[in-house]
Amino acid sequence: MNWWLFIFLPLSAAFIGWFSNWLLIKMLFLTFSKRQPQLAQTLAPVIAKEFVSFSELEEKITNPDSIKKIMPVAEVHIDDFLRNKLKVSFPMIGMLIGDRTINTLKEIFMKELEEIFPVVMKEYLQNLQQDLNLEQTITDKIAALQVEKLKTAVYQHAGGELRKAYLVGALVGFLVGLVQAGIIMAFV
């Protein structure tokens, strides 16, 4: 009886399983580098549609809660304008208005801003969407992506999973080798 089959077949099959998974991952990066422009054109529309939604962005920005969050910043600037910059630009007005008038003007401006801010942001996002060719921008970014940087990032963040994939290939290969050795031994 050839007991070396129980050692050689499982070990060689384990190596083949490990090597196959290693080669597959290497081929994925090679395929990406060779087909990068085509992949960029294929992926860009999907990414632009699924990950960037101007309507969702518009909804988030024009949401009353979002506007309330930005209003204190606007109030600080309006206060500074009324108390300092207006007096510099129009010294006569600065001599005529006091704190009460400034506070009243600030209150009026803040109410107006609450009304016009959603309209302005909506218009801005619509113009941005028309001016920004998002699909082309994403296509250009993917096409310009350095494969070595991508590979480094993948190995850095998913290296453990890749090693597990290699080990799974080796384990499956080892088990297949044991089965083969058992079949051969049964018929010998």
Image: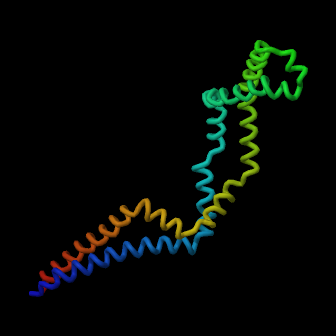
Between 73 and 178, the one nearer to me in the picture: 73
Query: Compared with residue 51, is residue 6 higher up or lower down, i.e. above or below?
Result: below
Q: Quadrant of the N terminus?
A: bottom left
Between 148 and 4, the one nearer to me in the picture: 148
| View extreme (left): residue | 1
- Residue 24 horizontal/vertical position (percent): 42, 73
Quarter residue 117 falls in = top right
* Residue drawn at point x = 72 percent, y = 52 percent: 132
Q: Is 105 displayed left or right of 142 in the figure?
A: right
* Residue drawn at point x = 49 percent, y = 71 percent: 29
- Residue 82 horizontal/vertical position (percent): 79, 23
Query: Compared with residue 119, is residue 34 higher up or lower down, i.e. above or below?
Result: below
Q: Is 119 displayed left or right of 182 in the figure?
A: right
* Residue drawn at point x = 63 percent, y = 61 percent: 141
Between 149 and 136, the one nearer to me in the picture: 149
Q: Quadrant of the C terminus?
A: bottom left
* Residue drawn at point x = 20 percent, y = 83 percent: 8
Q: Is 12 displayed left or right of 51 in the figure?
A: left
- Residue 127 horizontal/vertical position (percent): 76, 44
